């Protein structure tokens, strides 16, 4: 008998709760559901709420204990969090935010009305208020917006024994603390003291003698996706955040970076389809409005492709075989272009593609497109020629396929770079533009060659 993994167990509990909530709506017996719900980790409760339709979600939210609400809100996606907070009054929101880490609190405050923000800030002591206001002063998608100001700092001239006695007197350390931050008396960041060194080295040594000096502070203005790359490249668990003068502002921990990586991955997948929906049970009108924009853009590009086909109406009327084969050219170009653009967008997201190596990447993709175009052009030309008993049709579709695959590869490589320079998200706009290019070029090449050589 095999044991279930923790992930399978969590998924099973959430599935059980989802079913129980649906049953409870009909029977009215909510006591058992309340116990099961509040026994979950706040992150699991958040995932459960996101998986429920609006009515069941409101019911489940009412069953959650007040002291869990803040943590649940911090784990919930932006759209679901906003909807839940609309059901709460100002006093409930103030109570829910008590005891949250600075970074989680900042995430929640950014979605609240100004009046509620001021109420929450006035409920804090002066030190906590200063930390939150400092974090709020930075954009959400930067290291400053991601950081937690709850840090432990030490001076370089004290001994390890003094630091140990200070920690014992303090009684606790912030979660995900793998090192203490070493600063000057002016709060200038100079290095890190790992807890491993603190516990294993000679207590008589000074912090300056054992501290790590080669971990640079992360600028507060650094975009969060670049912060994630730093954590990945250097295997960091936490890292200090500094201002332009090198003064310590706070720290970023691996749990926040994992959230960034997950959000980036979700954004890439959703953007490829022109979507921005976090809440799968968002209101119908809101969902229709968001999707309708990109459906309209796609319709405009489809009309463009249809217009190109209309230019060759006389050719299609005389040679019906062209209408049968025409989708093949556009489809192959679309697939080839999608492969390239996906590769390039991923490379850009990981910091592997930029101006320095763009030219070589484009040349490489052109070669790949030409090689695949030649290979599959031969296959399609033979099939088409035998199918319609006309070698000319086979040659024309083969030539059109080579042209379209080369254009698709070059467009797939260049479009993300061009679109990003224009300040637009390549994942969001690249696929729509690429599809238009491959359709138009494919139809133009195939029907144009047919018009020239068959009529």
Image: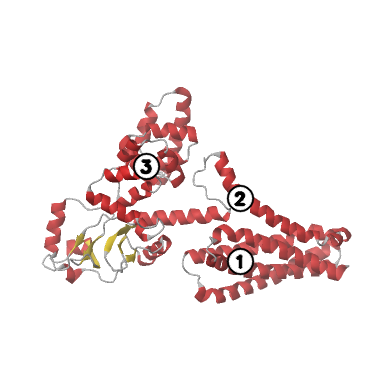
Which residue corresponds to mark 3?
72
> Which of the marked residues, 3 or 2, is nearer the chain's N terminus?
3
Q: Nearer the viewer, residue 317 or 200?
A: 317
Q: Quadrant of residue 241?
A: bottom left
Q: x and y percent of residue 413 in the render?
A: 59, 69
> Which of the marked residues, 1 or 3, is nearer the chain's N terminus?
3
User: Tag 1, which secondary structure?
Assistant: helix
Instruction: Give the residue drawn at x 51%, y 74%.
Output: 355
Which residue corresponds to mark 1?
412
Dot 2 crowding, Cα within 10 Å, few <14, some 14–19, many 20+: few
User: Tag 3, which secondary structure?
Assistant: helix
User: Tag 2, which secondary structure?
Assistant: helix
**Looking at the image, can residue 11 be seen?**
no
Q: Quadrant of residue 138?
A: bottom left
Whether 425 is drawn above or below 76: the answer is: below
Which residue corresponds to mark 2?
293
Q: Taking 115 as reference, is 421 left or right?
A: right
- Mark 1 near mark 3, Cβ–Cβ under 8 Å? no
Dot 1 crowding, Cα within 10 Å, few <14, some 14–19, many 20+: many
Q: x and y percent of residue 412 in the render?
A: 61, 66
């Amino acid at each position: 008998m095999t044991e279930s993994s923790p992930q399978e167990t969590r998924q099973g509990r959430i599935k059980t709760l989802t079913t129980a909530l649906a049953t409870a709506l009909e029977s009215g017996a909510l006591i058992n559901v309340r116990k099961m719900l509040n026994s979950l980790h706040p992150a699991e409760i958040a995932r459960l709420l996101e998986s429920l339709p609006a009515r069941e979600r409101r019911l489940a939210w009412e069953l959650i204990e007040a002291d869990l609400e803040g943590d649940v809100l911090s784990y919930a996606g932006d759209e679901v969090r906003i909807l839940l907070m609309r059901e709460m009054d100002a006093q409930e929101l103030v109570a829910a935010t008590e005891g949250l880490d600075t970074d989680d609190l900042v995430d929640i405050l950014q979605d609240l009305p100004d009046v509620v923000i001021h109420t929450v800030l006035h409920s804090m002591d002066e030190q906590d208020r200063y930390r939150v206001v400092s974090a709020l002063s930075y954009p959400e998608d930067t290291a400053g917006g991601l950081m937690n100001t709850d840090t432990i700092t030490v001076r370089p001239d004290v001994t390890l024994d003094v630091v140990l006695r200070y920690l014992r007197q303090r009684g606790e350390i912030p979660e995900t603390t793998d090192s203490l931050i070493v600063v000057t008396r002016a709060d200038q960041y100079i290095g890190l003291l790992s807890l491993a060194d603190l516990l294993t080295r000679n207590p008589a040594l000074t912090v300056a003698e054992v501290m790590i000096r080669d971990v640079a502070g992360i600028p507060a203005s650094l975009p969060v996706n670049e912060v994630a790359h730093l954590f990945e490249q250097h295997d960091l668990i936490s890292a200090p955040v500094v201002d332009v003068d090198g003064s310590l502002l706070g720290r970023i921990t691996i749990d926040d970076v994992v959230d960034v990586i997950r959000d980036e991955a979700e954004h890439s997948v959703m953007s490829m389809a022109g979507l921005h929906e976090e809440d799968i049970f968002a209101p119908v009108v809101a969902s229709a409005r968001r999707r309708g924009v990109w459906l309209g853009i796609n319709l405009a590009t489809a009309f463009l492709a249809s217009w190109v086909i209309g230019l060759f109406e006389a050719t299609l009327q005389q040679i019906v075989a062209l209408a049968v084969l025409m989708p093949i050219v556009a489809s192959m170009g679309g697939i080839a272009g999608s492969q390239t653009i996906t590769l390039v967008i991923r490379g850009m997201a990981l910091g592997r593609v930029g101006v320095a190596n763009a030219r070589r990447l484009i040349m490489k993709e052109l070669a790949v497109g030409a090689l695949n175009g030649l290979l599959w052009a031969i296959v399609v030309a033979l099939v088409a020629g035998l199918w319609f008993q006309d070698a000319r049709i086979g040659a024309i579709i083969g030539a059109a396929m080579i042209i379209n695959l080369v254009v698709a590869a070059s467009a797939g490589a260049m479009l993300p770079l061009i679109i990003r320079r224009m300040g637009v998200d390549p994942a969001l706009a690249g696929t729509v533009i690429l599809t238009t290019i491959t359709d138009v070029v494919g139809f133009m090449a195939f029907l144009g060659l047919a018009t020239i050589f068959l009529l």
